[in-house]
Image (tube, rainbow, N blue to C red):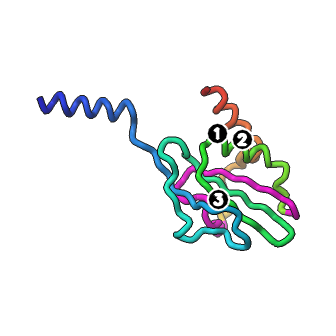
Amino acid sequence: MRFIIYTTFLGFFLKTGPALQIQCYQCEEVKHNDCSAPEFIVNCTVNVQDMCQKEVLVKEDGVHYRKSCASSGACLIASSGYQQFCTGKLHSVCISCCNTPLCNGPRQKKRPVPSAARPAASPSAPTSALFLLSLLTLGT
């Protein structure tokens, strides 16, 4: 009897898979502070919001930040749609997506990479975004 219960439970678990949940920073248009403190950490909706999103807006009074959980489709579409407005100048809007816990937090300081250890050039951001979008549309 136990064997039947265990195999039924195992079959259900393998069929549905483990619940995927990511943590992200979340804030609405915070000025001059990138809202990467522990009080801004939230648990995203399981199996729906699988990415973290970060918007950086350059306004007259300084840099504003918005951070949130997002679905991969919505985030990738938004980030590719705003690519042309990501200039770093006044009225600039940059939207980025990532899929590791708390990846929309503070920027990591880059460590210098020795020239012999540098990886090959990666595709440009617009090319990568278009590739990901095409994969998303093929899957639906």
**Do the residues bearing badges 3 and 1 touch, measured as CB atoms within 8 Å?**
no
Pointer 2 residue: 77
The kind of residue on which mark 3 rests is: Lys
The kind of residue on which mark 2 rests is: Ile
Dot 2 or dot 3: first in sequence order is: 3
The kind of residue on which mark 1 rests is: Gly
What span is in magenta? 89-112
Pointer 3 residue: 67
**Do the residues bearing badges 2 and 1 touch, measured as CB atoms within 8 Å?**
yes
* Mark 3: few/some/many CA within 10 Å (<14, 14-19, 20+): many
Residue nearest the viewer, comparing 31 with 126? 31
- Residue 96 seen from this side: yes
Pointer 1 residue: 73
Give the secondary structure at mark 2: helix
- Residue 111 seen from this side: no
Dot 3 or dot 1: first in sequence order is: 3
Q: Residue at x 74, y 61 (%)?
A: 56
* Mark 2: few/some/many CA within 10 Å (<14, 14-19, 20+): some
Q: Position of residue 47 (x, y in %)?
A: 49, 41
Q: Position of residue 8 (x, y in %)?
A: 25, 29
**Left or right of 131, for residue 88:** right
Work out how far the residue at label 2 is from the one at label 1, CA to CA, in angstroms.
6 Å
Residue nearest the viewer, comparing 26 with 20? 26
Residue 76 quadrant:
top right
Residue 80 quadrant:
top right
Q: Position of residue 11 (x, y in %)?
A: 30, 29
| In magenta segment, residue 99 | yes
